[in-house]
């Protein structure tokens, strides 16, 4: 919502003269209001302060005939305050609309992840209109120093309209109430911050807490709201519900002292705008601020050093723009200005409804035992702020990585991927990760075919003498299942020299591709040889060199037999070597 500026009129001469005995000749207008009596007569109320006492408000009413009457006398004569608005709760807000759930797709994950195995998953989160968070805690924080009188009375009169706004009917809203004045305490003020009501769904209790507000005290212009904001963010007695969105609705007409030193608060460290902001952000609180027209120029954004004389032991260092900076730092925060007593209730209702429905941030979080398999979520910081009156389709990429070594049995892990909106989980999907048990790997070097001498062929064999010397080669792998259970086998082969051409010399690499599966009954044997590798690769008669990986769910007896001779015309018998192949435990 854009910041609104309003031009405040000056005091009429007759009113200034009337107030001079109480406020001096330099009285300053704090606020005005108009009312029409049943007779049709129009009355104008002027609320004024002295520059030396910015929170000591004197109010006088000017009639159309020029008659001036103290507001208290007029209220007593009429039996009511004609300048306090009367609100119909049914017309303050906008009608409620049914809430739709936040959706996460795919709705479930079931992974089998061997160690170092990687998968990329696209997750889509659909945020419907009317917000993401069904539960919201709205804390009304009012400046109740003397200059806030007209605004405080208007909010008290409109409390029922604010609490009963039909725009909030679709949500579980709890209301907290508190108000602030300033330090020194005791002395100039009765308190710096008064926490009146922990967030509650009891509208009667909230209405009574608001009704207890009275505008008084304050001293200098700057007030103690930084202390109040610090307390709201850090004090456990505030009573925020643990699974609710947290919203502070703060309204006042003057900036806050910065810093508030330890000799005033008794805390171990001074409170500053920066520290209070960090507290609010850390607590996941959205701050909605409203600057009223009853006090300092620029109200909550005013210069905190302009009139801060009450803090004699705590030199000021703050700067203008506090409310704008604080709200901008919190998710979905907003600051509006130029709000008078006549518009405060409708302004608060609109801002509260927008804050409850809107979302400052939506991101994904991995929880439970499966979180260890999530390498990254992009975007890590999520999305936001998101308006509450439209549908948002958000896309995330999750990288899953196998992080657990295999064991003797399958290992099963469970957890969730949660959609978190402003600190609250609003949707979730179950995740199950199975780390398959270790298998037995029998890795065998394979040499097959003929490597001819270059003198015979007349051309360069690119495998060259670096691979094997000229000759004929054969490999046989003997596989026996000595157990009493059938074994499930998978065979993989990676060719490094194919038909005499080197394809896998470093830095080149070749994947081991699965090419066959079989079940080997108990007490049975089988064999792989160069002919069987025709299933894996078409290797021709030229030289074939590669790696055969026989993978089994049970231990086997495996031996490899290599045969070689010098080729046609060679002298001597072929050489035959045999050796056992030890199993490696791996996924």
Image: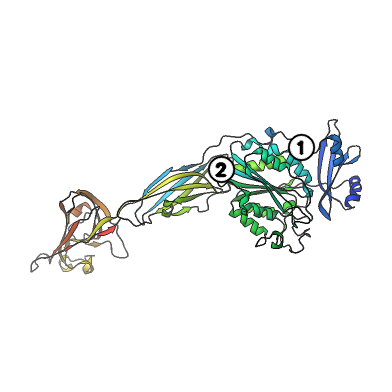
Give the color scheme: rainbow, by chain, secondary structure or one colour: rainbow
Find numbered disc 1 in the image and state the secondary structure of the residue it sits on.
loop
Q: Is residue 97 above or below residue 113?
A: above
* x, y percent for residue 84: 78, 38
Residue name at image x 71 percent, y 42 percent = 210
Q: Residues within 10 Å of mark 1 (few under 14, many from 20)?
A: some
- How much space separates mark 1 and mark 2, taking CA atoms? 32 Å
Mark positioned earlier in the residue sequence (1 or 2): 1
**Looking at the figure, which quarter contains the C terminus?**
bottom left
Dot 2 corresponds to which residue? 133
- Report the side of 183 relative to 394 (left or right): right
Residue name at image x 55 percent, y 46 percent = 243
Which of 420 and 453 lies nearest the eye of the viewer? 420
Dot 1 corresponds to which residue? 85
* x, y percent for residue 535: 21, 51
- Report the side of 452 relative to 80 (left or right): left
Which of 158 and 27 lies nearest the eye of the viewer? 158
| Residue 454, image quadrant | bottom left
Whether residue 340 is visible here, answered yes or no, is: no
Find numbered disc 2 in the image and state the secondary structure of the residue it sits on.
loop
| Residue 449, image quadrant | bottom left
Q: Is residue 6 above or below residue 460?
A: above
**Looking at the figure, which quarter contains the N terminus?**
top right
- Report the side of 57 relative to 386 (left or right): right
* x, y percent for residue 327: 65, 51
* x, y percent for residue 577: 14, 65
Which of 431 and 478 lies nearest the eye of the viewer? 431
Whether residue 109 is visible here, answered yes or no, is: yes
Which of 118 and 150 lies nearest the eye of the viewer? 150
């Amino acid at each position: 919502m854009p910041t609104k500026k309003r031009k405040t009129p000056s005091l009429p001469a007759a009113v200034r003269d009337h107030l001079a005995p109480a406020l001096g000749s330099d009285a300053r207008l704090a606020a005005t209001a108009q009312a029409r009596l049943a007779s049709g007569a129009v009355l104008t109320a002027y609320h004024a302060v002295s520059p030396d006492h910015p929170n000591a408000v004197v109010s006088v009413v000017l009639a159309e005939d020029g008659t001036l009457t103290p507001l208290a006398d007029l209220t007593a004569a009429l039996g009511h305050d004609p300048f306090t608005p009367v609100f119909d709760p049914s017309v303050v807000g906008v009608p409620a609309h049914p809430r739709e759930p936040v959706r996460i797709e795919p709705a479930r994950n079931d992974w089998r992840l061997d160690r170092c195995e990687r998968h990329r998953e696209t997750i889509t989160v659909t945020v419907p209109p009317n917000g993401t968070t069904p539960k919201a805690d709205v804390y009304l924080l009012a400046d109740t120093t003397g200059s806030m009188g007209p605004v405080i009375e208007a909010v008290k009169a409109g409390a029922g309209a604010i609490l009963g706004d039909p725009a909030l009917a679709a949500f579980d809203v709890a209301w907290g109430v508190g108000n602030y004045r300033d330090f020194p305490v005791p002395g100039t003020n009765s308190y710096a911050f008064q926490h009146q009501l922990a967030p509650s769904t009891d509208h009667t209790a909230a209405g009574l807490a608001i009704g207890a507000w009275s505008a008084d005290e304050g001293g200098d212009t700057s007030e103690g709201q930084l202390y109040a904001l610090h307390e709201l963010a850090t004090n456990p007695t505030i009573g925020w519900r643990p699974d609710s969105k947290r919203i502070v609705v703060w309204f006042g007409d003057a900036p806050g002292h910065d810093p508030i030193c330890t000799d005033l608060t008794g805390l171990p460290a001074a409170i500053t705008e920066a520290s209070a902001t960090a507290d609010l952000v850390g607590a996941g609180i959205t701050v909605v601020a409203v600057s009223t027209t009853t006090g300092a120029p620029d109200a909550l954004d005013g210069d905190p050093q302009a009139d801060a004389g009450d803090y004699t032991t705590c030199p000021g260092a703050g700067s203008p723009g506090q409310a704008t900076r604080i709200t901008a730092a919190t998710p979905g925060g907003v600051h509006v200005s130029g709000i008078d007593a006549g518009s405060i209730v409708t302004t608060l209702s609109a801002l509260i409804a927008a804050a409850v429905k809107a979302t400052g941030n939506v991101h994904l979080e991995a929880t439970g035992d499966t979180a260890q398999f999530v390498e990254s979520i992009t975007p890590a910081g999520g999305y936001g702020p998101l308006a509450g009156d439209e549908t948002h389709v958000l896309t995330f990429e999750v990288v899953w990585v196998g992080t657990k070594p295999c064991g003797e049995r399958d290992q099963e892990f469970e957890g969730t991927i949660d959609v978190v909106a402003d600190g609250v989980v609003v949707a979730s999907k179950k995740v199950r990760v199975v780390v398959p048990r270790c298998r037995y790997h029998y890795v065998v070097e394979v040499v097959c075919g003929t490597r001819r001498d270059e003198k015979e062929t007349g051309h360069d064999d690119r495998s060259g003498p670096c691979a094997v010397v000229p000759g004929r080669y054969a490999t046989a792998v003997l596989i026996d299942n000595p157990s009493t259970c059938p074994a499930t086998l998978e065979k993989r082969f990676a060719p490094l020299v194919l038909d005499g051409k080197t394809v896998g010399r470093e830095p080149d690499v070749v994947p081991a591709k699965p090419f066959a599966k079989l079940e080997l009954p108990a007490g049975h044997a089988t064999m792989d040889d160069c002919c069987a590798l025709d299933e894996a690769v078409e290797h021709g008669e030229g030289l074939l060199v590669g790696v055969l990986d026989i993978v089994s769910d049970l231990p086997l007896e495996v031996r490899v037999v290599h045969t070689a001779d010098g080729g046609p015309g060679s002298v001597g018998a072929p050489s035959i070597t045999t050796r056992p192949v030890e199993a490696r435990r791996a996924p």
